[in-house]
Amino acid sequence: MIHDNVLSLATGEGKTPASPAQPQTIPQIIQTPVPNPPQGKKPIRLLACGVPKGVNGIIHRLHVLGFAEVIAWTPPLPSPIEGEIIRVLTRHIKIES
């Protein structure tokens, strides 16, 4: 059985950009330790990559379906592909043996 909680690494849509102390790239986000992780749970990071309109559309659809709050995703991060962005959602799950 999977139990999850949303952990936001985002500053939220429409807010000012993240401070320099916060991770700004995908490798930094993945390598940054999750503060105060729920006991017995492991972080799982989901990536949404593509053109901004498509990525944001998918994130909003997932919100409507009850999967995750829009603000739980990181702000748009630069992609190595011109014209595309990456957004990351971190969830915590308890992995049962």
Image: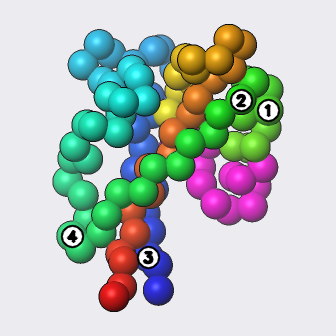
Marks 4 and 3, the one that precedes in the sequence: 3
Residue 50 shown in magenta? no
**Residue on which disc 4 sits:** 39
Q: Which of marks 4 and 2 is nearer the N terminus?
A: 4
Real-space Cα distance between discs 4 and 3?
12 Å
Using a 10 Å C-alpha cutoff, classify the residue at mark 3 as few (fewer than 14 neighbours), some (14 to 19) or many (20 or more).
few
Say which element carries label 4.
loop
- The answer to whether residue 56 shows anywhere in this view is no
Marks 4 and 2: CB-CB under 8 Å? Answer: no
Residue count near mark 1 (Cα–Cα under 10 Å), binned few <14, some 14–19, many ≥20 = some
C-alpha gap between disc 3 and disc 2: 28 Å
Instruction: Give the alpha-carbon distance from disc 4 to disc 2, as whole Å.
Output: 34 Å
Please give the name of the residue rendered at 63% of the width and 23% of the height, measured from the top-left corner: 85
First in sequence: mark 3 vs mark 2? 3
- SS under mark 1: helix
Q: Distance between the residues labelled 3 and 1?
A: 28 Å
What amino acid is found at the position of numbered circle 4 in the picture?
Gln
Residue pointed to by mark 2: 50
Disc number lying in front (2 or 1): 2
The residue pinned by badge 1 equals 54
Which residue lies at the image location 64% right of the left edge and 60% below the top edge?
67
The residue tagged 3 is: 3
Q: Do the residues labelled 2 and 1 touch (CB within 8 Å)?
A: yes
| Mark 2 → mark 1, Cα distance in angstroms | 6 Å
Left or right side of 89 for 42: left
Q: Residues within 10 Å of mark 2 (few under 14, many from 20)?
A: some
Specify the segment rendered in magenta.
61-72
Q: In this view, does 26 lie to the left or right of 36?
A: right
Give left or right: position of 25 versus 86. left
Residue 12 locus on image (x, y percent): 51, 30
- State yes or no: discs 3 and 2 in contact (Cβ < 8 Å): no
